[in-house]
Image: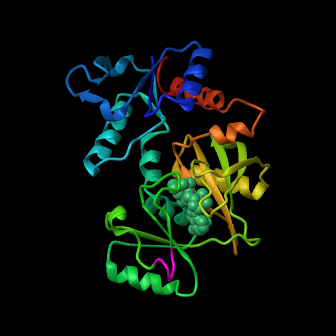
């Protein structure tokens, strides 16, 4: 049987369950923050009162990792590692989830792989924060929570908002150059990559500078250039993703990658993409990877 770790039983989980059913595969859903593990001669996981031997799990699809204390987040990732140690395919794989939930790590990896990404300054030291802020004296800069998603907690720092939301940031300050679209639009692009191929893309256009679909951005169909496709595939490869949602923006120096999501949503994308069912494409790839790693 297959497992979906999910926090919500909404549209995405329904789409995934349908894709499993269409492939005649048995699937169960579990909340990772309500799951426990037993490390003994019969390694197993417990969720909703059910004890499942790891050897009976054919693969685990990760649709959600909730926030929490450092210990909780580490434990949830430990559960995924535990599965992988017992040859259960975890999709996206645990290491790439670890790399991408942390915006600092993602920026470092993109930069080290020579993939254009905005100039970013990170510190947990208030003195350096002040120094970094001075670098942007005449320009805007963006401050992001390093474990954030869906555009939550992002701020523009300027003369009206000099200090970031210290409490929300837990003492790590990720300050990035603000990318201004040459035509003043609030636009970015999401390229969806599965197994190192861009399968679907969209433009997101917001009424404010935060263009996430969760923030009300409008999705439009989009056909990416070869340059953008290469950026998306290179980013996905650099982070070692099985599949990913790559965010690309346009700044003064051309296209640049702002984020590589290992647990991307695709409801907005599917609404403007008729060629294929995205969930089916993901699950086809997931089952292919599971088949490669153990007999199922
Ligand atoms: N450096 C930037 N300059 C201008 N806008 C940005 C910048 N970084 C992010 N944004 C806007 O904020 C949104 C969310 O940022 P992102 O880094 O993708 O974080 P999240 O994990 O919250 O999605 C982006 O989709 C984009 O609209
Ligand atoms: Mg994003």
Q: Is residue 197 above or below residue 289?
A: below
**What's the image's color scheme?**
rainbow
Q: Is residue 186 magenta?
A: no
- Looking at the image, which residue is at 19% across and 24% down? 40
Q: Main secondary structure of the magenta part?
A: loop
Q: Residue 178's x, y, as percent?
A: 59, 73
Which of the 4 quarters of the picture holds residue 227?
bottom right
Q: Which residues are magenta?
A: 157-161
Q: Quadrant of ligand 1?
A: bottom right
- Looking at the image, which residue is at 39% across and 83% down? 130
Quarter the N terminus occupies: top left
Decide if residue 125 is in sight here.
yes
Q: Is residue 247 above or below residue 159?
A: above
Is 198 positioned to the left or the right of 122 in the image?
right
Q: Is residue 160 magenta?
A: yes
- Looking at the image, which residue is at 77% across and 71% down? 183
Q: Is residue 24 above or below residue 216?
A: above
Residue in front for this viewpoint, 175 or 281: 175
- Looking at the image, which residue is at 50% across and 63% down? 107
Q: Residue 215's x, y, as percent?
A: 58, 52
Q: Residue 72's x, y, as percent?
A: 28, 44
Q: Residue 287's x, y, as percent?
A: 56, 25
The outermost residue toward the top is: 24
Is 114 positioned to the left or the right of 92 in the image?
right
């Amino acid at each position: 049987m297959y497992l979906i770790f999910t926090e919500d039983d909404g549209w995405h989980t329904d789409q995934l369950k349908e894709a499993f059913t269409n492939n005649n595969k048995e699937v169960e859903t579990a909340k990772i923050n309500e799951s426990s593990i037993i490390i003994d001669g019969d390694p197993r996981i417990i969720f909703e009162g059910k004890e499942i031997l790891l050897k009976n799990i054919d693969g685990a699809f990760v649709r959600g990792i909730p926030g929490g204390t450092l210990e909780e987040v580490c434990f949830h990732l430990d559960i995924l590692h535990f599965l992988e140690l017992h040859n259960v395919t975890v999709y996206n794989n645990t290491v790439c989830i670890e790399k991408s939930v942390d915006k600092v790590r993602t920026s470092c990896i993109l930069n080290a792989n020579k993939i254009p990404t905005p100039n970013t300054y990170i510190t947990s030291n208030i003195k350096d924060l002040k120094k970094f802020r001075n670098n942007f004296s005449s320009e805007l800069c963006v401050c992001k929570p390093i474990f954030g998603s869906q555009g939550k907690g992002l701020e523009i720092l300027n003369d009206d908002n000099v200090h970031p939301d210290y409490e929300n940031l837990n003492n790590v300050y990720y300050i990035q150059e603000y990318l201004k679209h040459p035509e003043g639009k609030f636009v970015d692009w999401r390229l969806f990559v599965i197994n190192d191929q861009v399968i679907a893309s969209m433009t997101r256009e917001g009424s404010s500078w935060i263009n996430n679909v969760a923030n009300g951005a409008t999705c439009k169909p989009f056909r990416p250039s070869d340059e953008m496709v290469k950026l998306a595939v290179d980013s996905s490869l650099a982070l070692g993703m099985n599949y990913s949602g790559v965010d690309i923006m346009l700044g003064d120096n051309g296209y640049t990658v702002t984020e590589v999501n290992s647990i991307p949503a695709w409801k907005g994308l599917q609404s403007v993409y008729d060629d294929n069912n995205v969930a089916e494409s993901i699950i086809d790839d997931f089952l292919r990877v599971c088949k490669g790693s153990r007999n199922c």
